[in-house]
Image (spheres, rainbow, N blue to C red):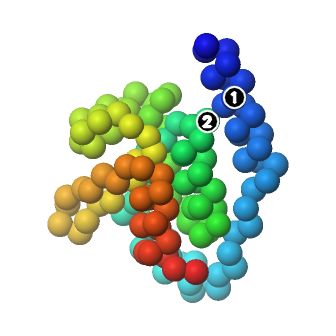
Amino acid sequence: MKLIRWLLGRLILAFDFTFRPRRRSLTAEQKQQQQQSAQNLSLYQYLACPFCVKVRREMRRLDLAIPIRDAKSDESSRQQLEQEGGRLKVPCLRIDSDNGESQWLYESNDIINYLRDRFPA
């Protein structure tokens, strides 16, 4: 079973690399504003998870440089996701507010809808 998961993961990554979505074109000013607005976000994910790939593809389409935390290979990210987020489930978008509180958004479709609403095309 482990071998099958590994092979499927590599197929997913190969497909993602081969058929990468195009980034939208932004002016330098728009790009800078977008990056400032995305500073309080981070994505917790597993590299070959199909739902995580789906979110990363949307981030690429929107041309967002959101820090990515690998909860599978990085133990500190894994612990942070489990302890602060409440569960060990990916993908998960951490949204830090100005008052120091964090909101943890699970489910790939919810994350994509949030990103599309916050960073409209």
Instruction: Identify the element where label 2 is drawn.
Output: loop
Type of amino acid under label 1: Leu
Image quadrant in which the N terminus is located: top right
The residue located at (73%, 47%) in the rendering is 16
In the image, is 88 to the left or to the right of 108? left
Q: Looking at the image, can residue 62 be seen?
A: yes
> Circle 2 is placed at which residue position?
48
Write down the quadrant of residue 103 in the picture.
bottom left
The residue located at (48%, 29%) in the rendering is 72
Type of amino acid under label 2: Ala
Q: Looking at the image, can residue 80 be seen?
A: no
Q: Residues within 10 Å of mark 1 (few under 14, many from 20)?
A: some
Instruction: Identify the element where label 1 is drawn.
Output: helix
Give whichever of 107, 28 is nearer the camera.
107
The residue located at (72%, 24%) in the rendering is 7
Q: Earlier in the sequence, mark 2 or mark 1?
A: 1
Cα distance between the residues tagged 2 and 1: 8 Å
Q: Is residue 35 above or below residue 75?
A: below
> Circle 1 is placed at which residue position?
8
Decide: marks 2, 1 in contact (CB < 8 A)? yes
Write down the quadrant of residue 58 in the picture.
bottom right
Give whichever of 101, 2 is nearer the camera.
2
